Amino acid sequence: MQSHPMLRHYTTRSAAIAAAAALLPFNSLKPTISITPFSSSSSAMKPTFTTNQQPSSVVSNLTFSLSSATPPNCFSAADSFNSELAASDSIEPSSLLVVVSFYKFADFPDHADFRYPIKRLCEELRVSGGIILAPEGINGSICGTREAVERVLEFIQSDERLKGLRQIESPVTPEDEAIHHGHTSKSPVGAGEDAPFRWDHVRVKLKKEIVSLGMPSVLPTEKVGTYISPKEWNELISDPNTVVIDVRNTYETRIGKFKGAVDPCTTAFREFPTWVEDNFQLAGTDSLPSQEVPENKISKSQEDTEGCNSPPRVAMYCTGGIRCEKASSYLLSKGFKEVYHLRGGILKYLEEVPQSESLWEGECFVFDKRVSVDHGLAQGTFKLCYGCKQPVSDADMESPKYEYGVSCPYCFSTKSEEEKERARARQRQFEVWGVIGGPDKGRRPTQSTNEPQSDSSPHMSKSV
């Protein structure tokens, strides 16, 4: 019986280590990579590399270690974690992969110091995906074997400030597992550098915010709305005195939302404060949204708020909960008294609440290859338009405006012919090479004889 393709790559510890070593520049190989953090005032972690052995002996002894005499906060538990990692055998591969989305708001001014260690650890453990670090905390979605993902999450939470990550775990379909392992690629996104299931790639970005609202004064670490569990959510949103607000964007709300929820029709989270200002008169008596709120909610809420300045009771939800934390903090700063949000977001609700009891209608858009999920977090029916990254249905793909890898009914009219031609060139690259940008992506090509003909070659190196 033949073994799984990935098992043949990782049958021994030395094979896994050799694969990790291949990620390093040749002149940076050494028996031990020692990253020595300085004081918390240091501007960056400074790794020291030595090359006193031949590559063959280096590979067999390669380890990943973090040593520190006086570690900064983000490495408060790093010594014990990395001693265990160095002492243990390589993680046994498994065909069972998991996707874990996580976040934590925290006072994290030295977030940049965390970038290199977490990236190196993910690369060594073959964990893919994307992680955002910012002064306000961490936000990420990663994919790998359960053992590998758990080690990454354990390392992140070795920093006291990041303990108690809010996590949502999702299973991986066999098709996505194959993409993750690099055996098949069925879409340009599958080969793109941002693809969360690409087995050899992880991105760790430094940003100003882990979720962009554009208002630095809004701090979920100081005040946030009241969390409501998925089991209590139905009762709250069924109350006529509660205004339910979907904090997501139009391309997400289009394919599913909670029954009776108000859709702000935003294209970006940064637009949410403006929508609140436009739809709530915070100093007057009429403080209800002017959009699709059921009549029984409007009349009852107006009656209850008549003669007072308090806005109505608000219940908010989003995909995983992170946007609601900022949105609830913002509403509280604007004078809202009763602000609730769904703990764990839609994903946790779909995981825990049986479909027979659910008030969710449609499917939930997710930011990975699944595109959408249904109850029980089963993969949904929507696909992705690689021209605009919006979800498309089977009916959308029957439209004459749909062209695989180029456009769909939602972006056809907004794209110029030049943009469509660039997208077609990108699609041809993928069909010829299986990777966007061609075999020389990221390097200066030695020759151009194998490149497909295209009049938009200056744009070919960009991935979707």
Image: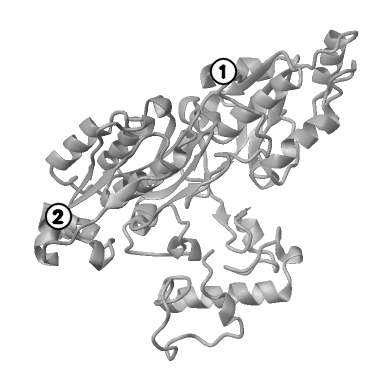
- Residue 373 in percent (x, y) is at 51, 42
Q: Residues within 10 Å of mark 1 (few under 14, many from 20)?
A: some
Rendered image: mark on residue 31: 2
Which of the 4 image quadrants contains residue 395? Answer: bottom right
Residue at the location (59% across, 75% down)? 424
Query: Circle 2 sits in a helix, a strand or a loop, which is it?
Result: loop
Q: Quadrant of the N terminus?
A: bottom left
CA separation in Å, label 2 and label 1 = 50 Å
The residue beneath circle 1 is 228
Residue at the location (36% across, 32% down)? 72
Q: Amino acid at mark 1?
A: Ile
- Residue 161 in percent (x, y) is at 42, 26
Is any part of residue 233 visible from this angle? yes
Frontmost residue, 255 versus 453: 453
- Residue 263 in percent (x, y) is at 74, 36
Looking at the image, the residue that sits furthest to the bottom is 449
| Residue 356 versus residue 45 in the image, above or below | above
